[in-house]
Image (spheres, rainbow, N blue to C red):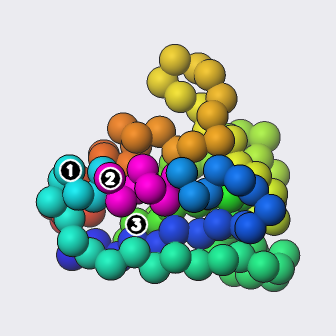
Amino acid sequence: MPTIEFFYWEECPSHERALAILREVMAEEGITAPVDVIEVKTEDEAQRYHFYGSPTIHINGRDIVLPLEDAGEPSLTCRAYRRADGRISPQPPRERIIAALRAASHS
């Protein structure tokens, strides 16, 4: 079973929807692993968790999406994700969640 960590910063409003999407995808994929939901509260924690903004999902210790090139250092901030069509979104792309879960389940 994969290790799934969901990191968020309370100041960003997109984390609740992102967690719901993660849980929806897990149900669709038949993955029953627990999700460790972690609130990142300090800059030190952001560094320790390799937290490039809220929300961030790690599966087996790896971020499911490499941070955007201009993301800078890990920090307390809201995260932006690039969709397949090039648009920016506050939610991690569903297809990236699916791909990461499938890869972790087959390794």
What amino acid type should be assigned to the residue bearing mark 2?
Glu
Q: Give the distance between the C-alpha atoms of the residues marked 3 and 2, in whole angstroms.
A: 16 Å
The secondary structure type at the circle numbered 1 is: helix
Q: Earlier in the sequence, mark 3 or mark 2?
A: 2
Q: CA distance from mark 1 to mark 3?
A: 17 Å
Say which quarter of the image contains residue 69. top right
Q: Is residue 75 visible?
A: no
Looking at the picture, tell me which residue is in the foreground, 70 or 41. Answer: 41
**Would you say the residues marked 1 and 3 are in contact, meaning their CB atoms lie under 8 Å apart?**
no
Image quarter in which the C terminus is found: bottom left
Verify whether residue 7 appears in magenta: no
**Res 35 visible:** yes
Residue 43 as seen in the image, left or right of residue 94: right
| Figure disc tally | 3
- Observer-side mark, 1 or 3, equals 1
Q: Are marks 1 and 2 in contact (CB under 8 Å)?
A: yes
Q: Please name the residue that numbered disc 1 is placed on.
A: 28
Dot 1, how many residues are within 10 Å of its Cα: few (below 14), some (14-19), or many (20+)?
A: few
**For mark 3, does the 10 Å Cα neighbourhood hold few (<14), some (14 to 19), or many (20 or more) residues?**
some
Q: Is residue 97 above or below residue 75?
A: above
Q: Is residue 26 above or below residue 3?
A: above
Q: Which amino acid type is marked by label 1?
A: Glu
Quarter of the N terminus within the rendering? bottom left
Q: Which residue is mark 3?
A: 59
Q: Amino acid at mark 3?
A: Ile
Dot 2 lies on which element?
helix
* Range of residues picked out in magenta: 18-24
Q: Residue at x 23, y 57 (%)?
A: 27
| Side (left or right) of 69 relative to 55 | right
> In the rendered image, which residue does mark 2 sit on?
24
